[in-house]
């Protein structure tokens, strides 16, 4: 080989390595991250398990490798979660010399305080203290409950109405709080005929984010309630009827004492967020922070109460899309940003724990003040970014109303012909909601829901890695802008800050997964159709957009819910959908 050719070769090698080193976000690396995090070995990354911790360690190591500084405790911000609620051995209830039985006659509620009491019972109807323009109803008005036990009816007089003024006052927790405010030391809940004609006892551990109340709460069956009412010659079903009719307080002392012990145990476990930082280069702006987040936890082996949509199948819920994909994206973004050193503001990368249990990791982070939330100027969230559809090129971006400049920014960076579906709401089913609640502008990237969501089939083989790389590169341009722009994004309110109330549970369902992030289309996009469900049998397909139910228009999820509540089981309804821009009428048997 002569010298010239040799030099040329050297030059070529230099150029190509230089080119390659530019490319920090690679298919190989995304694939590697998801392969590892979604492997059976990590058993679905359940919070509080050894595998959950191993997942966190993998992420911390990768942050470190990319040159980020691990903060909190070597990158781990620990917090406690409740993994299980169980009845202890000491649950007792005695009345008029009768000993009643746990789970047959009574159960303490999962949020009950553990108490031993022997006190008089006051009946307080539905246990309301409502003062609104539309409604005034105070069950505690003419009766003193200080230091006493109250007995309340569950629910409210309009339990079958979807939209009702009573809804915020109807749940057990709200009633317990009212009783406590009035000085009661315990609440006995009893079902009327309307809320449960069969009088079944509540199940323990249903709520995913338990926090204990400071007074006792017991669910008793109607036989116990009637025994308590015996001296007054009343019974609970008659009382229910008469209160529903008069719609006002009918409170009185039962002149009867009840003796009980509640014993509910919480099993706790330690889990963690993984937090790392890239310090800003600008003297002044480095005191401002941009958060890039993705949750790394998932549902473990599934099962009842886990959030799995196949609760009867115990199998590894690998969560390749939900949300190994999001973690892979932020690891790649961290690496690229660290190498390219284009960051005036400081950037905090967080892999959140326990998102699936109710956004627990992100809630803990914002409350922890590890970083002062006032200094956090924007939050970018990645949750389920692995199922990019190369045909439609759709990316769902939520929170776009939470900052004045966000939609324009996204449009201006869309040079790769993505079809961007904007959803303005700052609240949503993932960690950005915790930041939006603190008045921080949020941008949430996702490729949307699908049939395998929260099932053991959310696997690597269905991830579109090339597509995810495209999405991640696009988000990088947004992130660089947000980090380095002269003026921060301007926060705007975009919808409620908490879970919005759709009203009460639907009686009939179509068996579809409604899409969100579609506020720029009219109708309700269908993100999944359950096999064998009414919609499936009626010929509905994924990506259909529901625009009418029984000739009445459907513009969004709220309309959809409202139209559906008017329908009854067994009824045949017509549903008009848009499929490939053409209208199609389906007949669906409910
Ligand atoms: N990744 C999901 C949220 C999601 C669902 C994103 C569908 C895109 C499409 C998240 O992990 C999740 O499961 N969220 C819960 C709510 C949360 C507060 C526990 C949900 O959607 O039920
Ligand atoms: Zn999930």
Image (cartoon, rainbow, N blue to C red):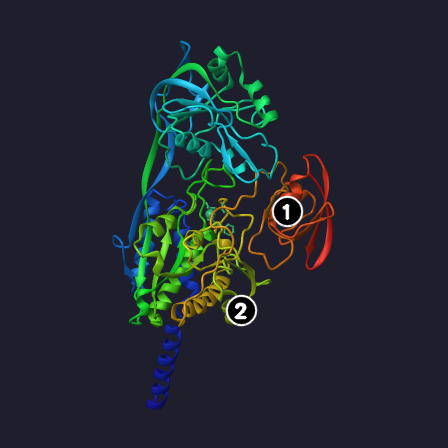
Q: Position of residue 365 (x, y in %)?
A: 34, 51
Q: CA distance from mark 1 to mark 2?
A: 29 Å
| Along the line of sight, the residue nearer the viewer: 66 or 368 | 368
* Mark 2 crowdedness (10 Å alpha carbons): few <14, some 14-19, many ≥20: few
Is 16 in front, or is 346?
346
**Residue 442 x/y as whole percent:** 45, 59
Q: Which secondary structure, mark 1?
A: helix
Q: Is residue 66 above or below residue 122?
A: below
Q: Secondary structure at mark 2?
A: helix
Residue at image position (44%, 20%) is 122
Q: Is residue 312 visible?
A: no
**Residue to which mark 2 is pinned:** 411
> Looking at the picture, how far across and down is residue 249, in whole percent?
53, 26
Decide: few, some or many residues near mark 1? Use Cα within 10 Å; few <14, some 14-19, many ≥20. many
Residue lying furthest left: 73
What is the x, y in percent for residue 214?
A: 35, 31
What residue would you read off at disc 1? Answer: 560
Taking 51 as reference, is 468 left or right? Answer: right
Give the farthest residue toward the front: 142
CB within 8 Å, label 1 to label 2: no
Asked whether the viewer can see residue 233, the reply is yes
Quarter of the view holding residue 418: bottom right
Front one among 551 and 75: 551
* Quadrant of the drawing holding the C terminus: top right
Dot 1 or dot 2: first in sequence order is 2
Establish if 168 lies above or below 517.
above
Relative horizontal placement of residue 96, taking residue 155 as reference (left or right): left
């Amino acid at each position: 080989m002569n010298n010239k050719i040799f030099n040329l070769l050297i030059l070529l090698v230099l150029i190509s390595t230089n080119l390659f080193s530019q490319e920090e976000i690679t298919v190989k690396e995304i694939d590697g991250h998801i392969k590892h995090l979604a492997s059976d070995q990590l058993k679905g990354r359940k919070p509080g398990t050894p595998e959950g911790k191993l997942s966190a360690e993998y992420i911390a190591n990768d942050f470190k490798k990319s040159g980020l500084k691990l903060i909190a405790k070597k990158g781990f911000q620990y917090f406690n979660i409740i993994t299980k609620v169980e009845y202890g051995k000491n649950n007792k209830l005695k009345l008029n010399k009768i000993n009643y039985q746990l789970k047959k006659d009574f159960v303490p509620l999962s949020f009950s305080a553990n108490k031993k009491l022997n006190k008089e019972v006051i009946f307080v109807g539905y246990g309301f203290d409502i003062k609104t323009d539309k409604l005034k109803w105070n069950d505690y008005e003419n009766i003193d409950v200080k230091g006493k036990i109250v007995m309340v009816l569950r629910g409210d007089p309009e339990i079958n109405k979807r939209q009702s003024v009573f809804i915020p006052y109807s749940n057990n927790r709200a009633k317990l709080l009212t009783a406590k405010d009035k000085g009661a030391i315990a609440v006995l809940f009893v079902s009327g005929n309307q809320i449960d004609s069969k009088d079944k006892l509540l199940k323990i551990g249903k709520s995913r984010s338990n926090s204990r109340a400071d007074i006792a709460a017991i669910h008793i069956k109607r036989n116990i309630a009637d025994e308590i009412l015996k001296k007054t010659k009343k019974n609970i079903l008659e009382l229910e009827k008469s209160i529903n009719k008069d719609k006002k307080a009918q409170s009185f002392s039962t002149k009867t004492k009840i003796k009980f012990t509640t014993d509910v145990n919480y099993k706790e476990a330690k889990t963690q967020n993984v937090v790392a930082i890239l310090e800003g280069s600008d003297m002044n702006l480095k005191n401002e922070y941009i958060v890039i987040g993705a949750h790394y936890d998932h549902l473990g082996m599934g099962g009842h109460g886990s959030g799995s949509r196949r609760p009867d199948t115990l199998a590894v819920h690998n969560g390749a899309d939900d949300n190994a994909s999001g973690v892979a994206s932020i690891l790649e973004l961290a690496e690229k940003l660290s190498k390219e050193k284009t960051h005036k503001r400081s950037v905090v990368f967080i892999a959140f724990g326990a998102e699936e249990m109710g956004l627990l990791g992100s809630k803990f982070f914002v409350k922890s003040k590890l970083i002062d939330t006032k200094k956090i100027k924007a939050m970018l969230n990645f949750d389920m970014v692995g199922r990019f559809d190369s045909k439609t090129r759709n990316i769902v971006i939520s929170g776009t109303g939470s900052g004045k400049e966000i939609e324009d920014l996204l449009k201006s960076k869309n040079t790769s012909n993505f079809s961007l579906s904007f959803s303005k709401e700052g609240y949503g089913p993932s960690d950005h909601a915790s930041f939006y609640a603190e008045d921080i502008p949020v941008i949430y990237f996702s490729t949307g829901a699908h049939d395998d969501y929260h099932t053991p089939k959310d696997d690597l083989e269905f991830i579109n890695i090339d597509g995810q790389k495209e999405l991640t590169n696009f988000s990088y341009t947004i992130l660089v802008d947000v980090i380095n722009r002269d003026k921060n994004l301007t926060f705007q309110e975009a919808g409620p800050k908490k879970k919005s109330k759709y009203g009460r549970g639907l009686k009939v369902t179509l068996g579809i997964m409604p899409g969100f992030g579609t506020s720029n289309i009219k109708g309700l996009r269908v993100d999944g159709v359950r096999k064998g469900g009414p919609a499936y049998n009626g010929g509905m397909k994924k990506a259909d957009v529901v625009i009418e139910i029984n000739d009445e228009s459907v513009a969004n999820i709220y309309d959809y819910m409202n139209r559906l509540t008017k329908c009854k089981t067994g009824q045949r309804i017509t549903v008009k959908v848009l499929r490939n821009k053409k209208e199609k009428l389906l007949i669906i048997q409910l």
